[in-house]
Amino acid sequence: MAKIDLIIDSNERGMFCEAVERRAKSAGMTVIRQPLVVGDYKLGGALVEAKSVTDFYQSMFSGHLQRQLDNMDANYERFFIVVHGELKKHAQFIREQFNANIPISQLQETFTGFMARIMADFDCQVFYTNTISEAAQFVVKLHDKLHKPASRHGAHTIRRVGSNDLRLDVVMTIPGVGRELAERLLEKCGSIEEMCFPDSLKQIKGLGEVRRNLIIKVLTSEEEVRQERKVRRSK
């Protein structure tokens, strides 16, 4: 099986980017720099958007991160947010820049709420750690696991725990559709049959064109549907 390159957006700079590149090369991965329209790191068919804690707060309040999520969701079936840094340092930044004292507990509550909102609206996973080193390690490990088949732990044989609604179980077998998204699909569309129509799926917040097309293809195709990972390589 050919190794998939780890692609870093050519505009990425700083300690985190350097840590990812260092760890990836140490792991034997080929690292390529090229412009990415969305996301900071391209792991084959998946994207990672990485932010410091302060960047995460600012982009959530400005709406910029929501726009980035919309763009990733419209173009990729899988995408992740990686956040690194300490909340106490963000509190210090607020004191120095805005002369405001916000309790760490309040920042933590807002931070957790932001992460929960992203995962609920976009079926996107968020990884948070205090250190740049651990965040970089996660990106490299994620790249590795995304392109390595499950083996001894048996995850390849049991994908999901069954629910009490067989309709949910059917919808959750579609790649990129978790339980929360499956429940919203059924709530908005009313039935699996209604999910076969593009106009019905457009009602679902956080459901991009790529996943809409995949859902319709899985539910309506008379031929075998395969999930392919396309990787753009530099020449």
Image: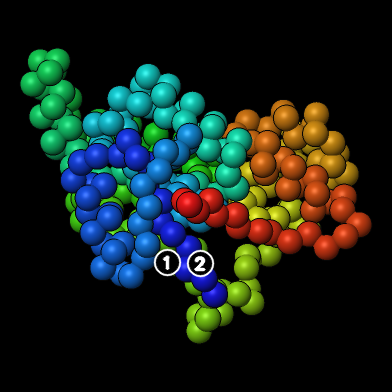
Residue 150 in picture, x, y percent from top left: 53, 75
Q: Which mark is residue 144?
A: 1
Residue sitting at 27 percent across and 55 percent down?
21
**Which secondary structure lies at badge 2?**
loop
The residue lying furthest to the bottom in this view is 152
Residue 224 in picture, x, y percent from top left: 83, 63
For disc 1, the neighbor class at 10 Å (few under 14, some 14 to 19, many from 20) is some
35 with respect to 26 (left or right)? right
Height in image: 108 above or below 20? Answer: above
Residue sitting at 23 percent across and 59 percent down?
22
Q: CA distance from mark 1 to mark 2?
A: 6 Å
Image label count: 2
**Which secondary structure lies at badge 1?**
helix
Q: Which residue is mark 2?
A: 147
Height in image: 11 above or below 224? Answer: above
Label 2 sits on what residue type? Answer: His
Residue sitting at 13 percent across and 36 percent down?
89
Label 1 sits on what residue type? Answer: Asp
Which of these two is toward me, 165 or 6?
6
Residue 193 in picture, x, y percent from top left: 88, 44
Residue 11 in picture, x, y percent from top left: 32, 36
Q: Are marks 1 and 2 in contact (CB under 8 Å)?
A: yes
Residue sitting at 31 percent across and 69 percent down?
27
130 with respect to 192 (left or right)? left
State the quadrant of the N terminus.
bottom right
Q: Is residue 165 visible?
A: no
Q: Is residue 233 visible?
A: yes
For disc 2, the neighbor class at 10 Å (few under 14, some 14 to 19, many from 20) is some
105 with respect to 176 (left or right)? left
**Residue 154 position by quadrant:** bottom right
The residue lying furthest to the front in this view is 235
**Residue 105 position by quadrant:** top left
